[in-house]
Image (cartoon, grey):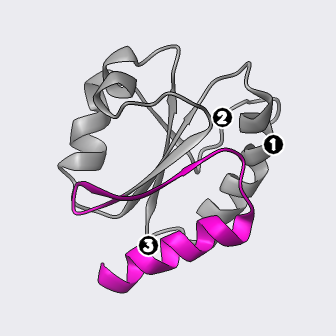
Amino acid sequence: MAGSDMSEKLKKLQDGDFAKMVVESGKPAVVDFWATWCEPCKRLDQVLEDIAEKYNGLISFYRVDVNESQQTINRYSIRSIPTLLFFHEGEIVDHVIGAVAREEIEKKIENILRYA
């Protein structure tokens, strides 16, 4: 999708569908809390798209715009962006704050998949 600020690999979530897609599904998931105006978020975009492609079918990747999903950011106490939350069986098992290296994100994903 040329010119899109959203990858198909990173599915957009809002308050109304977060619980169903992430918590209740039980499937391992990475949730990226971001905003269009956030420069570090933009730097992380391509890394997350590449990782989502690599782990396609093994773990779900979602994106939550902090400007559109107040209930979700309050529920998970998101104070800085980008923030990545790593879920396993509906529970947060790890997190990352800031635009970190690809290797750090993949290491956390591998840890989750070991128990999936």
Q: In the rendered image, which quarter contains the N terminus?
A: top right
Of the image marks 1 and 2, the number of the one nearer the N terminus: 2
The reply to whether the magenta stretch includes residue 94 is yes
Judge left or right: residue 79 versus residue 38: left
Q: What is the x, y in percent for residue 6? A: 66, 34
Q: Are marks 1 and 2 in contact (CB under 8 Å)?
A: no
**Foreground pick, 29 / 91:** 91
Circle on res. 43:
1
Name the residue type under label 2. Answer: Met
**Foreground pick, 53 / 92:** 92
Secondary structure, mark 2, is loop
Q: What is the x, y in percent for residue 45? A: 73, 44
**Looking at the image, is 95 positioned above or below residue 37?**
below
**In which image quadrant can residue 40 be found?**
top right
From this viewpoint, is residue 104 visible? yes
**Residue at the image position 35 percent from the left and 64 percent from the top:** 28
Q: Which residue is mark 3?
A: 58
Mark-to-mark CA distance, 1 and 2: 13 Å
Of the image marks 3 and 1, the number of the one nearer the N terminus: 1
Name the residue type under label 3. Answer: Leu
Q: Please give the range of residues in magenta.
A: 87-116
Name the residue type under label 1. Answer: Arg
Q: Circle 2: is it few (<14), some (14-19), or many (20+) Cα within 10 Å?
A: some
**Looking at the image, is 76 positioned above or below residue 49?**
above
Q: Which residue is mark 2?
A: 6
Judge left or right: residue 15 versus residue 80: left
Secondary structure, mark 1, is helix
**Residue at the image position 50 percent from the left and 71 percent from the top:** 109
**In which image quadrant can residue 20 be found?**
top left
Q: Circle 1: is it few (<14), some (14-19), or many (20+) Cα within 10 Å?
A: few
Judge left or right: residue 91 versus residue 98: left
Q: What is the x, y in percent for residue 30? A: 46, 54
